[in-house]
Image (spheres, rainbow, N blue to C red):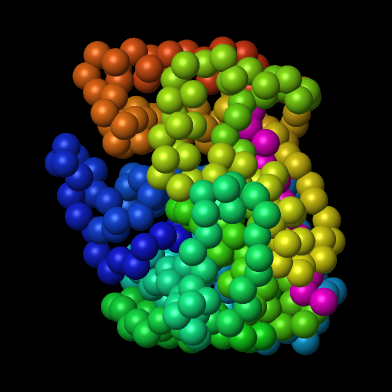
Amino acid sequence: MTATSVTTTTVSDTGDRRYHNSTSAYVLPNDAIELERLDAQATAIVEMIGGTTCLAPMELLKGASKAVDVGCGTGVATVQIASLLPSVCVYGLDISPVSEDVRKTAPSNVKWSVGNVLDFASSEPDKNINHSKNDRFGGDTEPTDEFEPSQDSKPGSNVPSSDIFVSTRLDYIFGRMLFLGISDWARYFSIASYSLKSGGIIEHQDLDWKFYRIGTSKCLSDDWPWHQAVISAAEQSGLSTRAGSDAAKLMKGFGLEIISVQTFEFSFVPSRKVPNSQAMGKYVQGKLLPQYPELLRKMLGSQGIMDSDLKKLTEDCLRDINSEEGIHQKYTVTIARKP
């Protein structure tokens, strides 16, 4: 997940989890438990969307030379993309280094970088991208197309992140589950548009925060007090609660042509009615839900919600998101092309 620059982790204030040493909005840990969860999540997502890491048409990437996996986490998708595109140099970018084991076993066409996709300064001081809160949540934006990469070099990097996002350098940008780390989506897609070559492809896979009834657009979470508190905390941190469904609108705003938009059910309780939900539901029940109390502690604690109030909201949360078979969030895959 991509956020503010970081090279190390630090022990949390409870002493039992380790976190990215970051001032960003990103709240998830960076320890062995979390890395195992991320790998399990990656496997479940692949099954959910049909058995492949990415849905971008491979024929559009013939002749490609450079790609980046933004917020690469454990590096699992980076390695998979590099295997699909063996003649392409694939950069894996994250705010913390991938493990040494992954670095040693990755294909030779992978290069790793530690840094933040948002860490760019414009070439002129008065052109700094400094979007308002409404812009971050999909409001009207004025594209800015002049960037000067920041200078950085961090342990665990083969290449500085500033060398990746250069004007018209990239053929393919892949990003998945960035919703807890990107605090300015207009800036993100502006940088993506700037960095893509003509004909280059961006693929964005992400969640919206609401919960729905199986096979419907019936929203269940609008009346949940704990969910309203989480949404408020997210928005105050600059995060978008529509990181999946708003992507197409933002991409268009920065001159990208939409190729396809597909939506999937990111199931919290598996259902036989949605066969592709089985792996995701089992992952959520086994790996994600046990992390929810800590996630809520971090998010709601930042809003001053603690002790008995936090305990009550956490209990309500775990009850509600297990309340019926097939309950899910919307997972949207948006693919676009630079003209």
Tell me what residue is drawn at x 47 percent, y 40 percent.
235
Q: Give the left or right position of residue 119, taking residue 211 as reference.
A: left
Q: Please report the bounds of the magenta region as a residue range.
A: 328-339
Tell me what residue is drawn at x 52 percent, y 54 percent.
132
Tell me what residue is drawn at x 56 percent, y 68 percent.
69
Q: Quadrant of residue 242?
A: top right
Residue situated furthest front in the rendering: 126
Q: Considering depth in this image, is 238 or 159 the residue closer to the camera?
A: 238
Quadrant containing the C terminus in the rendered view:
bottom right
Q: Considering depth in this image, is 218 or 123 the residue closer to the camera?
A: 123
Residue 289 point in image, percent of width and height: 44, 29
Secondary structure mainly formed by the magenta segment:
strand
Please say whether residue 145 is visible from this viewpoint.
yes
Q: Is residue 332 magenta?
A: yes
Q: Considering depth in this image, is 333 or 324 the residue closer to the camera?
A: 333
Residue 188 point in image, percent of width and height: 56, 64
Q: Give the left or right position of residue 46, taking residue 24 as reference.
A: right
Q: Does the magenta stretch include residue 177?
A: no
Tell me what residue is drawn at x 65 percent, y 69 percent.
143
Residue 46 point in image, percent of width and height: 65, 50
Question: Is residue 56 placed above or below 205 in the rendered structure?
Answer: below
Instruction: Please give the count of numbered marks on the rendered protein.
Output: 0
Question: Is residue 315 placed above or below 187 in the rendered structure?
Answer: above
Question: Is residue 165 placed above or below 213 in the rendered structure?
Answer: below
Q: Give the left or right position of residue 56, taking residue 280 as reference.
A: right
Residue 263 point in image, percent of width and height: 75, 42
Please say whether residue 107 is visible from this viewpoint.
no
Q: In which quarter of the image is residue 214?
A: top right
Q: Considering depth in this image, is 295 or 238 the residue closer to the camera?
A: 238
